[in-house]
Image (cartoon, grey):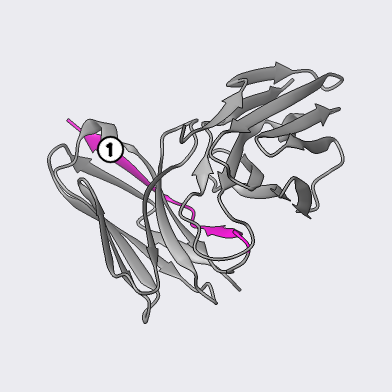
Amino acid sequence: KNQVEQSPQSLIILEGKNCTLQCNYTVSPFSNLRWYKQDTGRGPVSLTIMTFSENTKSNGRYTATLDADTKQSSLHITASQLSDSASYICVVSGVKGFQKLVFGTGTRLLVSP
Amino acid sequence: DTEVTQTPKHLVMGMTNKKSLKCEQHMGHRAMYWYKQKAKKPPELMFVYSYEKLSINESVPSRFSPECPNSSLLNLHLHALQPEDSALYLCASSQDPTGGEDYGYTFGSGTRLTVV
């Protein structure tokens, strides 16, 4: 069964600190993996997207990694800001030719002052 | 324009009402999607339109009726909803539904629907 699991479920960190979120997936065949940031009550906003051949992708203070052999990805947030408080969702696209996404349940991050 | 625009942002409707949600994109994307998201849950796919034709209906109740008038617009018509249908409804679009890597998968900000 195609699944995406994220850990931790929730995380509280102090402003300015770094953190790493984890994503494991069993989706096959694999097309690409995306990380989205979703503020409460808003739509997801894309942070990064990686294909099979990519193992690192950065977007400002966000750096995603992908290990397609172990089917693991991580999202590292550097020098966290209060505005980073949100849910971070790992999404895997498993079928080329049609964009049917498999969503993780997300990590809820709270950055406290 | 790199956005997917959804209106209204908030909607409160009674169980006997008929209302519509609207979604618009001007990125030339040929696939458009409706998702339903309950609190603290990931989005659930409802419908997919590919080149203005309904490609996927994920066994959604008939009280939800999608419509794609043209390649830029997607509507979701609502009728006789139940309180459990209250959720955030997200629209998304992607560039090419027929193959290749799609870097353009974009979500709208959503419509917060409350059924009373």
User: Quadrant location of residue B20?
Assistant: top right
For this rendering, which residue is in front, A23 or B46? Answer: B46
Dot 1 amino acid type:
Asp
Q: Name the residue under label 1.
A: A84
Instruction: Identify the residue at horizontal 48%, vertical 49% (top origin).
Output: B104
Q: Is residue B24 above or below residue A60?
A: above
Please give the range of residues in magenta: A98-113
Q: Position of residue B24 (x, y in %)?
A: 62, 31
Instruction: Identify the residue at horizontal 61%, vertical 59% (top origin).
Output: A100
Instruction: Identify the residue at horizontal 54%, vertical 76% (top origin).
Output: A28
Q: In this view, does B81 lie above or below B31?
A: above
- The quarter of the image holding the C terminus of chain B is top right
Report helix, strand or loop for mark 1: helix
Q: Is residue B80 left or right of residue B36?
A: right
User: Quadrant location of residue A113?
Assistant: top left
Let me know if residue A10 is in the magenta part.
Answer: no
Q: In this view, does B59 lie to the left or right of A110?
A: right
Q: Position of residue B65 (x, y in %)?
A: 82, 37
Q: Position of residue B8 (x, y in %)?
A: 62, 20
Instruction: Identify the residue at horizontal 56%, vertical 49% (top origin).
Output: B94
Residue A62 seen in the figure: yes
